[in-house]
Amino acid sequence: MSQGLFDVIILGSGPAALTAGLYTSRADLKTLIIAGTKWGGQLQLTTLVENYPGFPQGIQGPDLMINMRKQTERFGAIIVDIQLKEVDVVNQPFTIKAGDQIYQGKTIIIATGADTQWLSVPGEKDFLGKGVSSCAPCDAFFYRNKRVIVIGGGDSAMEEALVLTKFATEVTIIHRRDSFRASKIMQDRVIGNKKIKILWNSTIKEILGKDKVTGVKIETKSKGMWEMPIDGIFVAIGHTPNTVLLKGINLDSKGFVARVEERNKQGQLLYFTKTNRDGVFTAGDVHDYRYKQAVTAAGFGCMAALDVEKWLEDHE
């Protein structure tokens, strides 16, 4: 059953999607946000957020998302908590299938986010926000003068470890192979840092603790199975952008949505968040593999909304 034509349909429900919806609805654009059955993005799995502006005492992640949602709905955005099934970005107006409903939009903002790749070991889910994290810039402050480990071997793991050295007394990188895949410059920085130790050919088998993380079980080729006491574990084995349903949208080499910075004949930037499909824009972690912060996702959501508003003006 069709639900009429929207000026913009936003796919996602994290900071990027809700900020985009706030801006488009305030611009008097008929806005639909398809939030999914588990709305709110990764902040729904986060406890205390201290680095989002405007909350000097910090705020719980789920509370921040509830506030964002209420603010967006206040200006008239329609939010539906149903699962996205199909996206047609070939024919205009664009057709979106979600649940048993069909929606049409003049424009689309893709803000479906990216999921952290977890270890899937016992204890990991139990201690999310209680010693298990995937974001050192978000949580490193909580590990001042403590011992932490970082799991991974790419640039992200190197970056996480280096951030943590500013707070933790000891940082150990645990990698399942005997060499990193990170760029040489990042490896050199890590290896040259006296605070960082490296455990090669090692894998985490279990995360230990009661109310919070107290240690991990590690298996190494040289020592077999043993326990290591720690205060925190940072998982940095990658992110998977939610792009499975985005047929016809160009992705970059990492699998994230590729942006197209369209300019006019004078070289002035027209759209910063545009994709390869005219009228389809992107915002947040689904295209941003570098920053991955709630505040930057919200910023991209604002930019995508302003680009949509300009695109509709230019085409109508």
Image: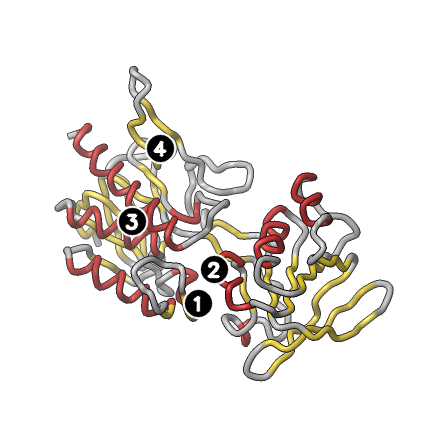
Q: Secondary structure at mark 1?
A: loop
Image coordinates of residue 269 in percent, x first then y, are 31, 26
* Residues at marks 3 and 2 touching, judged by CB atoms closer than 8 Å: no
Q: Which residue shows up at 51% across the image and 64% down it?
A: 141
Inspect the image, locate mark 1, and give the three-letter code of the amino acid beneath it.
Answer: Thr
| Residue on which disc 1 sits | 46
Q: Which residue is mark 4?
A: 277
Q: Which mark is residue 10?
A: 3
- Residue placed at 56% from the left, 67% from the top? 144
For the residues labelled 2 and 4, say whether their Cβ atoms are less than 8 Å apart.
no
**Comparing marks 3 and 2, which lies closer to the viewer?**
2
Q: Vertical placement of 207 versus 196: above or below?
A: below
* Alpha carbon distance from label 2 to label 4: 34 Å
Q: Residues within 10 Å of mark 2 (few under 14, many from 20)?
A: some
The percent coordinates of residue 180 (x first, y second) are: 72, 47
Quarter of the rendering occupied by the N terminus: bottom left
Position of 243 compared to 136: left or right? Answer: left
Query: Which comes before the other along the chain, label 3 or label 2?
Result: 3
Identified by mark 2, the residue type is Cys
Q: Mark 1 to mark 2: distance in Å?
A: 10 Å
Kindly state the secondary structure of the residue where label 3 is placed: strand
- What residue is shown at x 35% (from left), y 57% (from top)? 14
* Quarter occupied by residue 226: bottom right
Q: Are marks 4 and 1 in contact (CB under 8 Å)?
A: no
Residue holding disc 2: 138
Q: Determine the CA span between mark 4 and mark 1.
A: 34 Å
Q: Residue at x 69, y 61 (%)?
A: 172
Viewer-nearest residue: 257 or 219:
219
Q: Is residue 170 above or below residue 110?
A: below
Q: Residue furthest bottom?
A: 210
Q: Amino acid at mark 3?
A: Ile
